[in-house]
Image (spheres, rainbow, N blue to C red):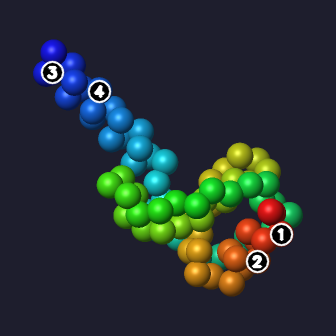
Amino acid sequence: NLRCSFAVFSVVLLLGSAQCCTSYNEKPVPVSMLRDYIPQRITGYCNINAVIFFTNNKKRVCANPKDKWVQKAMSIIE
């Protein structure tokens, strides 16, 4: 039972960290290529604050929430 619990916990850790941004995309992305976004906060899994943009072709772009282009893109998408 303990072995099973550890296995489940390991999978949760892997899945959680796979969804985290660990660095920022440095180049601005045209807003016309973006369809949605979610904020990422520092948690046990994620080590930076970020904005995760989703592109029209379902790619993820990690961006610094302090960057002007990121703030502008977020306001346009809303």
Which of the labelled discs sits on residue 72, or is there none? 2
Residue 33 at x, y = what percent?
81, 60
Mark 4, residue position: 8
Residue 25 visible, this orientation:
no
For badge 4, the amino acid type reads: Val
| Furthest residue in direction left, as rendered | 2
Q: Residues within 10 Å of mark 2 (few under 14, many from 20)?
A: few
User: Of helix, strand and loop, which one carries label 3?
Assistant: helix
Kindly report the distance in space between the C-alpha atoms of the residues bearing marks 3 and 2: 48 Å
- First reached walking from the N terminus: tag 1 or tag 4: 4
Kindly report the distance in space between the C-alpha atoms of the residues bearing marks 1 and 2: 6 Å
Position of 8 relative to 73 (above/below): above
Which of the labelled discs sits on residue 76, or is there none? 1
In the image, what residue occupies the spot 74% across and 68% down?
A: 74
Quadrant where the N terminus is found in the figure: top left
User: Of helix, strand and loop, which one carries label 1?
Assistant: helix
Which of the labelled discs sits on residue 3, or is there none? 3
For badge 2, the amino acid type reads: Lys
Residue 67 visible, this orientation:
yes
Residue 47 at x, y = what percent?
37, 64
78 or 63: nearer the eye? Answer: 78
Left or right, 54 with reference to 78: left
In the image, what residue occupies the spot 63% across and 56% down?
A: 38
Kindly report the distance in space between the C-alpha atoms of the residues bearing marks 4 and 2: 40 Å
